[in-house]
Image (cartoon, rainbow, N blue to C red):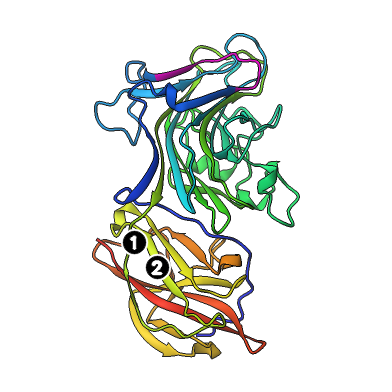
Amino acid sequence: MNLQPLVPVVVAGMFATSAAAQSVFINDNFETDTSADYIIVNDGSPDGTQEFAFDYIAAGIPLAPNSAPGDTGGLKLTANDTAGAGDAWTLFHTNPVAADFYVLHVDVWMNFTSGSGTTEFSEVGVGGDGVTYNSVFSPISGSGAFIAFTGDGGSSSDFRWFRAVPNTPMGETDNTTLPNSHPSYLGHGSNGSGSFFQSLFPAPPSTTAGSPGNIWTTVRIEVDNLGGQISFYFDDQLTFQGDFANDFNGFASLSIADVFTSVSTANNFTLYDNFRVEVPTNTVGSNYCSAAVNSTGATGAVFAVGSEFASDNLVTLSASDLPTNSFGFFLTSMNQGFTGNPGGSQGNLCLSGSIGRYVATGQIKNSGSAGIFDLTLDLNQTPTPTGLVSVAAGETWNFQAWYRDAVGGSATSNFSDGLTISFL
């Protein structure tokens, strides 16, 4: 098994969380008036409303996907109600988030009726400063990072994301609202007419194909401050994924922005529900097999956080004690094994049988200055030599990290120890 001729691509890590074991920073289901928990800022020309504990069930909107039966409340935001001018509002939760890894998720309903004035942007953000309102354009404004999207498909850029200037990675020139050709858009572009968004939000049930209008969608943002990577999901579908410098610790936010002059109608608003930010604390699996010492004098180690329940689809692998700035990726198999120095490697392969490699776009990693890389798994797309498969309850899968190294000035490779996870 010769793993050395790989041509690496520079990307960082990402993470997920388990609802069963986590540290929670924010948990707001908007069943009561929680306005005291938010800093509310606007663009200087306020022309909108914020209604906490809005009874959306009474308004004829179905229950949000992450709400409990009997829940009725949400956060209703409007903008550009009467003035006929651009208008933006951002609500920062007062509990700042500071963690190596964390995940934000929130249910979003973008309500509109066809006609003039329907196009508005919902925006969900992390790492904010609590002072600067969010808007992807007209004018561009924001802090940290946020994703913006329309419900009616009425913009030439229905899906965009913002990365603040201080978070621009070394060597990059793009910042603030990133162009739709940026690699972080994963080839999906920014227009709802693109095939990815048409498939993600078909009509029906959405009113306009390619945008989440008059339906619930769940937005998830995963922040890996160690690996310097942020990932944006709609309904568990990875949509954008990009690198960043420094960190995205700070205030999480919910926003609405109307960048057009046409006045919104009373039926145009954004509804948020089940706003939650959490950090994983539950480790899963057990280690096996011996790793060989690498150039740091340590042995590479792999561990996982998340949930053992396959249906949760919440597992993140991390490899540590690696040489700095080293490229690598994870391997997986249902069979354990032991092969010393495969393909000329300095390490030990702890897998056998059908071995899959996590080498798809975004899965080849760099250990950076900390000597660590990580990967959030999609258990429904587990690689094997013959294609992708789904992990099922009752199955045991084994994982290992392969990485580049140098010994005595000569390029080589090595492996971490193995990790076995029995899924329930």
Quick one: 98 or 420, which is closer to the camera? 98
* Side of 396 where 117 appears, left or right: right
Given the image, on which type of amino acid does mark 2 rest? Phe
Q: Residue at x 69, y 31 (%)?
A: 137
Quick one: 31 or 193, which is closer to the camera? 31
Label 1 belongs to which residue? 283
Can residue 119 be seen here? The reply is no
Determine crowd level at label 1: few under 14, some 14-19, many 20+ residues with C-alpha closer than 10 A.
some
Q: Say if 187 sits above or below 131 in the image.
A: below
Given the image, on which type of amino acid does mark 1 rest? Thr
Q: Residue at x 45, y 46 (%)?
A: 103
Say if the magenta span includes residue 345.
Answer: no
Residue at disc 2, secondary structure:
strand
Quick one: 7 or 326, which is closer to the camera? 326
Determine whether label 2 and label 1 are within 8 Å by CB: yes
Q: Say if 14 sits above or below 56 in the image.
A: below
Residues in magenta? 42-52
Can residue 63 be seen here? The reply is yes
* Quadrant into which the C terminus falls: bottom left
